[in-house]
Amino acid sequence: MIGANGEQVGVVAVEEALRIATEAQLDLVEVAPLARPPVVKIMDYGKYRFEQAKAARAAKKKQHVIHLKEVKYRPGIDVHDFDFKTRHARTFLEEGNKVKLTMMFRGRQVAHPELGREVLDRVMTALADIARVESDPKLEGRNMSMVIAPK
């Protein structure tokens, strides 16, 4: 048994441990049930649970969740639009997020997927300093998509 102040009391009968805990107006908590004999501690269980939850919230605040952002392009994209969208993809990568580059084909454009692939290759050369290809471009229906991740 471990006392309320953290001192080691020793091996004590269960009834005696419960009596000591009720005299101190605290709870008797089993800390290591698999140990022989089981280890119990006298503590305020409500305060202990509150501190555990507080530590879990602090740990959750510090973690960074990686999101998948999407930037959509068209095969006949103009220079300014290309630069604008690529700049957005760069900011997403700098924030630590993955980016899905989607090439949307309309009408007869789907007959020339090489034009879309050229645009995606231009994007990769523009972002080669901060990004790596996670999945190569693949044509799925009327869209060609690829995923890039920060280096």
Image (cartoon, rainbow, N blue to C red):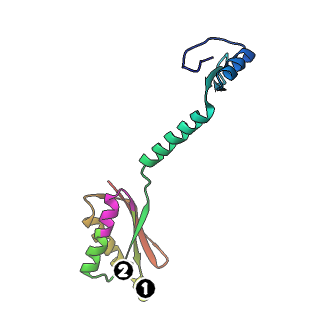
Residue 70 shows in the view: yes
Which residue is label 1 attached to? 106
Residue 69 disc label: none
For the residue marked with disc 2, what is the amino acid?
Arg
Q: Quadrant of residue 1?
A: top right
Q: Residue at x 42, y 73 (%)?
A: 144
Looking at the image, is 114 positioned above or below residue 57?
below
Mark 1 and mark 2: Cα distance apart in space: 8 Å
Dominant secondary-structure state across the stretch colored magenta: helix
- Are circles 1 and 2 on residues that touch, CB within 8 Å? yes
Pointer 1 or 2: first along the chain: 2
Q: Residue at x 49, y 39 (%)?
A: 55
Residue 93 magenta-highlighted: yes
Q: Position of residue 10 (x, y in %)?
A: 62, 11
Q: Residue at x 61, y 35 (%)?
A: 46
Looking at the image, is 147 positioned above or below residue 12?
below
Q: Nearer the viewer, residue 105 or 27?
A: 27
Q: Position of residue 91 (x, y in %)?
A: 31, 63
Q: Position of residue 64 (x, y in %)?
A: 42, 51
Q: Nearer the viewer, residue 16 or 70?
A: 16
User: Is 84 positioned to the left or the right of 37 in the image?
Assistant: left
Q: Position of residue 99 (x, y in %)?
A: 39, 64
Q: Residues within 10 Å of mark 2 (few under 14, many from 20)?
A: some
Residue 122 magenta-highlighted: no
Toward the right, the furthest residue is: 15
Bounds of the magenta segment: 88-98
Toward the bottom, the furthest residue is: 107
Which residue is label 2 attached to? 74
